[in-house]
Amino acid sequence: MKAVIIETFGGADVFCMAELPRPEPKPGELLIRVHASSVNPVDAGVRSGKILPDDPAHFPMILGWDAAGTVEALGPGTDGYTNGDRVMAISPQPGSLVGTHAEYAALPASQVVKIADLVPFSTAAAVPLIGSTALAALQALDLQPGASVLINNPEGAVGAMAAAIAPLLGLKLAAQEARNVDGAIDVRGREHGQQAFAAVKDGGAYATIVPEWWKPGGVFTAARGITPVTVQNPANQQVLLPLADWLAQGVLAVAIEDILPLYRIAEAHRRLEAPGHTGKFVLDHTC
C-alpha cells in the first residue's frame, strides 16, 4: 500500500512516500481504506520528536490520528459492519503505532463509527480528534443545560469545535471577557488557563486539555470549591457517535482551510506550524 512515512524525527522535509505491506485486520479490527485524513498540531509534535510514545519509537512511522473512508475487510468479532460501510475513525498516536496517512489502516472497531452518505469524507476526516476532544472536555464539566461555559480560544481547532458543540448540549457560550461563568474549558494553557480558571464562579467547573501547563496553587486553589479536570482524548465510539449523528443532521460543521493531496503532507505541516491558519488541513488520499 502507499503510505507517507518518516524514518527519523525532524522538520516537515522528513516525510516521504513509501510502499508498505497492506495490514491485515486482527480480531476486533476493521481494515479501513482511507479516502481522507487530516493534520493536527499533535502530528507536528510527534514528527519533530517533541511528543514521543511511551515505548521506543519504531521506524518507519506512519503519522495521523484522523481517518474517513470505507470498510475494506473485517477481522473476527466485528459484527455490525460490512464491507463498503462509510466510516470515520480515530487512531491515537503515537502510542497506537497505527497512523492514518496511508492507503489503509487497521483499527479497532471500537474507534470507528459509520457516517451518513451525505457527509463528505473530507469533512468527516477533519472531525475525530478535535471533535472527540472538545466533546470530552464539555462532558467533563458536567454542566446542566442552560449553564454558561467559557472557551478560552473559540477560534482554534478544538476551541472552535467546542464552541460549535456546546449549544448542541444546551449550553450557553460566554463571552471572552465574561466572569462568574458556570464552567470553563482551557485549550491554550499557561496564563490563559489561569485566566479561564479565574473566570469560573466559586463551586463551578473547569477542564483543561493542556495539562502540561498545570500550575498548583495560585488561582488553582481548593478554597474556591473548583476541582480542575485534565482531559485526554478518549478515542472511542462513545464520543464519535454523537459527532457522526450531528454531521448527518447538518448541525455540526468544521472549518477546513484547505484540502491537499496526501503526497503534499509536508506543505500541510509547514502551513500548520506557520501563524495565521484558520482551519483544518485535510489530505485527500484519492488523488
Image (cartoon, rainbow, N blue to C red):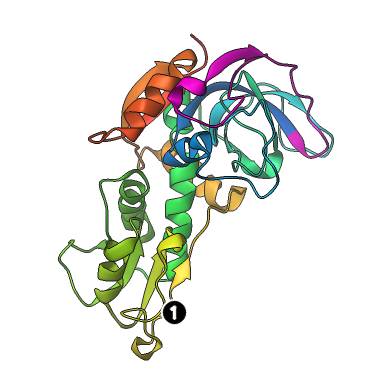
Look at 37% across and 84% down and name the residue there: 221
Amino acid found under the numbered disc labelled 1: Thr
Helix, strand or loop at disc 1?
Answer: loop
Residue 198 in which image quadrant: bottom left
Q: Position of residue 174 (x, y in %)?
A: 22, 64
Q: Residues within 10 Å of mark 1 (few under 14, many from 20)?
A: some
Q: Would you say 99 lies left or right of 215 here?
A: right
265 and 22: which is toward the camera = 265
Which segment is the magenta one? 1-29
Q: Residue furthest bottom?
A: 223
Look at 49% across and 36% down and name the residue there: 48
Residue 272 in which image quadrant: top left
Q: Position of residue 3 (x, y in %)?
A: 61, 18
Q: Which residue is mark 1?
A: 227
Q: Position of residue 136 (x, y in %)?
A: 48, 58
Question: Would residue 136 be counted in the magenta stretch?
Answer: no
Q: Would you say 269 lies left or right of 86 here?
A: left
Residue 130, compared with residue 181, is above or below; it is above
**Any part of residue 120 in sight:** no
Q: Position of residue 97 (x, y in %)?
A: 67, 37
Residue 281, compared with residue 163, is above or below; it is above
Look at 60% across and 43% down and name the residue there: 92
